[in-house]
Image (cartoon, rainbow, N blue to C red):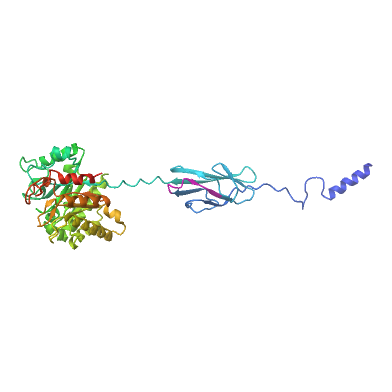
Amino acid sequence: MPRSFALLLLVGLAACGGGGGGGAGGAGPVLPSDDARLAALSVSDGTLAPAFDPDELAYDLDVAHDVASLTVTPTTAHAAATVTVAGSPVASAAPSSPVALPVGASEVEVVVTAQDGTTTRTYAVSVVRAAAPPPPPPPSPRAFAPYVDAGLWPILGALSDTALDTEGIRRAHLGFVVENAWAALEPAWAGVYGVGSTDAVTGDAPFLAGIEKVRAHGGDVVVSFGGASGLELAAAYQRAGRTAAQLQAAYQAVIDRYALTAVDFDIEGFHVADTASVALRSTALRGLQDAASAAGRVLEISLTLPVMPTGLDANGLAVLRSALDAGVTLEVVNLMCMDYGSGVVDMGGAAIAAGEAVVAQIRALDPSKDRAAACRMLGLTPMIGVNDTAPETFTLEDAAEVLAWAQANDLRLLSMWSLDRDRPGTGLSPTHSGLAQDPYAFTRVFAPFAR
């Protein structure tokens, strides 16, 4: 084209703002966004702590053990930003794929990349997945644990090789420890043999030997405080104006002497109605269990109480309620199914009726327990053969009936008074049943209860 026309064209283009960079009043280029914030962040389980804030980058999250994975939903503040959860891309406002959670602590990172492709922001969620709860304890093993009369001679003679080897006795209640008749406030077997005493006549060496003998056969013993004779330590300490802590120390001395894991308290006679000593004992028992727990040990406690076919009387219920109110964990509520004093003839039926009644009473005291739980803390202890109260006689047929009911209802304990009496004889005696029976006949009926 002619040169003059070209110059005019250039001048015109310049005047119109064409041909390159903008002049005053022209629009500049739109730059990519550098906004890498989240507008919202949510998780499928649990609650973020603190509550979400776009400028807060660190969060804690606790989830239960059964939460094995987690989805995270991030929403970007800028529509063109991109986001990843645990390294995998996620659309804004959409849930991520499940993120596997190990037990314990882990971290889930949510990384937002701005539209400019270089600006990033990382939100970290520190997750703690709870450990698996401990498995529920196995059902308490059912036990057949007959009483052995500590006041008979030879001492613990009922725990013979025949009883332990041939008859398979693996657990026994040794009764009873009461106040020492010769040393006030000191524990003694049958009120005579001082716990911890090295005296050749009135010391406890034969009891140590008997306990070790049972353990050498793979079994163990439950030491029982109280009984029908002598003064139970709680009553002795209450009368002397001593504290629950001092009573606890006396019980603890017995526990330590024989390395016991289970103790029994046979509360009968006037002791059942002695509310002051009952309260003192309950506080001491709670202290014993607390001390055992602090030392990483378990101490099983049972209460053995007199009963009628209609259940515990008001005094017996008060003893039970006192222990529960004090926070004592009772392994067994053991019923003395004997000496009803009401002309009972059907001793098997009476024991079962007493058991049914006390199951209902336990549930009334502790409504959280269902029937099965109440049964699992119940024990039955008949006096085999001829009882102290005529005409009561607990026969082998009664024993079979009680065994069947105890098995069907999964009771915790079957016992009997006593292993010493499980032999033939005539009349009432501490050393035989008063029946024409084979030696250990009652033991052989009850032994299958243990599992």
Q: How many marks?
A: 0
Residue 68 is at least partly visible in this image: yes
- In magenta, the rendered stretch is 64-73
Q: Is residue 209 magenta?
A: no
Residue 71 coordinates in the image, percent (x, y) = 52, 48
Residue 131 coordinates in the image, percent (x, y) = 40, 45
Residue 19 coordinates in the image, percent (x, y) = 82, 45
Task: From the viewer's perspective, tell me whether residue 373 is left or right of residue 399.
Answer: right
Residue 254 is at least partly visible in this image: no
Q: Main secondary structure of the magenta part?
A: loop
Q: Residue at x 25, y 49 (%)?
A: 407
Residue 398 coordinates in the image, percent (x, y) = 18, 52
- Classify the position of the N terminus by image quarter: top right
Q: Is residue 72 magenta?
A: yes
Q: Residue furthest bottom?
A: 314
Q: Residue furthest right?
A: 2
> Relative to 161, is 408 above or below?
below
- Classify the position of the C terminus by image quarter: top left
> Relative to 194, is 279 above or below?
below
> Camera-side residue: 315 or 246?
315
> Relative to 8, is 342 above or below?
below
